[in-house]
Amino acid sequence: MRKNIKFLSLLLAIIVLMSGVFVVPVSAADVNYSVSSAIGATGETVKVSVRLSSSVELWGANVSLAYNSDDLQVVNCVKGDVVGSASSVNDTGSAVNFSGMYTKTSGTVFTVEFKILKESGTSRLTLSSSENTDSNGVVHACSVSHSNITVSNNIDVPVEKITLDKTSVTLKKNGTHKLVVTVSPENTTNKTILFQSSNDNVATVSNDGVITATGGGTATITVKVGNKTATCKVTVNVPQTGIKAYGSTTRTAEIGKTLKLAVVKVPADTSDDFKTAWTSSDTKIATVDANGNVTPLADGVVKITAKSNNWTVVYTVTVGKGEEESSTEESTTEEPTTLLEEPNTEEITTDAPVTEPVTQPVVAPIVPEDDFPLAEPTTYEDTQGDATKDPSYIYIVLLATAGIMTVVIGTVAFFVAKGYRGKNKKQKIVVEEKHRGK
């Protein structure tokens, strides 16, 4: 029995030792490499990446990416994220070669940036690999792949991302800052950059991205390329230098009516926090609330003070009853003076045989315009419809009476004179007849 146990133990040890010498062969292409394609215009740069996808853990490999140097020029090549620090990648002028160890079973081996020299068509890339060994030194087969770089001078390459050197900036008034914009990818077709400010009163921005602070506050600068945008917040600091009264500092107020007072910040665009505290020197005369509303309570003079930060404004408010007492003095009104005299009715006698008295009109003297006193206009209230109360009516009646009297006197004088001439003529005839009779 013991001999059988020793025999089995010896057989097991032999199997373990032989397992380190004999390896079961793996199938072909259990290590896969791939290379990406790219599209670009003549003179532009494009990037391609070589990636690894392995089902086993590799310890080392040699990978080569061949290209046509007449079509493409290598600008840069860098190692990827699956390789160790001892790995290397370099350009030979017709191929980019990689050699080194892997730390992962999948990921990027290396990236190459090509400048396109070809005018049109495509340029073929060929990827190959050898000596893909695992930790036991076993070489694993790999697949070989190809890709193309297509030249197209009319292709539209959209914008993927735009970034700014600063997403926020603080400036003093009249200060400036130039935004630096980075557009990805570099070969994007649309490279037109648009700038816009949300508030020109705080900050403006030029077509080349220069921000100028114009006033206190905050503004947002928006940068747009294609359908992508980025923003930068601008804060402009303008310190407060004082306050001033809104209107006159001497005011009057009436009991029962609220008086509104206010102050103005200096400068008007200060970015400092503007708060005002109001106080009254005598709350028995008037009170004031936090918004500058003054409530008069009693007659007197009170000082209303407004304070903002380290600056003050003082209003002098005189409080009264609001209604003036009416005067008890009686007012008298003089009667208007009449400038026209009453007509003279004195009897006038002549040599003519007139038996009836004659009324002689007296015409009012003509007063120069400069010497005529201007009386205050008088308003007449005609409640009975009696027009005789109007002074103009009196003047018209007097003038009409004078005219009628003139006509009467003239007529009487005419007939008196005619009678006198007839009497003289009759006397003359009698004298002549007596003379002839003699």
Image (tube, rainbow, N blue to C red):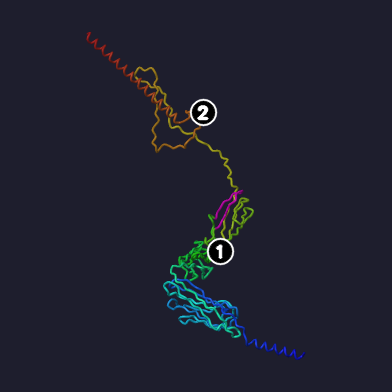
The percent position of residue 38, horizontal first and vertical second, equals 49, 72
Left or right relative to 56: residue 173: left
Q: Is residue 253 magenta?
A: yes
Q: Secondary structure at mark 2?
A: loop
**Viewer-nearest residue: 331 or 243:** 243
**Mark carried by residue 272:** 1
Helix, strand or loop at label 1? It is loop
In what quadrant of the picture does the N terminus appear?
bottom right
Q: Tell me which corner region of the image, top left, top right, bottom left or bottom right, holds residue 428.
A: top left
Residue name at image x 39 percent, y 26 percent: 402
What percent of the width, then of the height, locates residue 194? 47, 65
Residue 333 seen in the figure = yes
Q: Is residue 7 above or below residue 190?
A: below
On residue 361, the disc is none
User: Contact, CB < 8 Å: mark 2 with mark 1?
Assistant: no
Residue at the top extreme, as displayed: 437
Q: Amino acid at mark 1?
A: Asp
User: Mark 2 or mark 1: which is in front?
Assistant: 1
Say above or below: 58 vs 280. below
Residue 358 image point, x, y percent: 39, 21
- Image quadrant occupied by the C terminus: top left
Segment tinted magenta in the rendering:
249-263
| Apparent side of residue 392 relative to residue 311 in the rendered image (left or right) | left
Label 2: which residue?
384
The answer to whether 412 is drawn above or below residue 115 in the figure is above
In the image, 55 versus 395, the foreground residue is 55
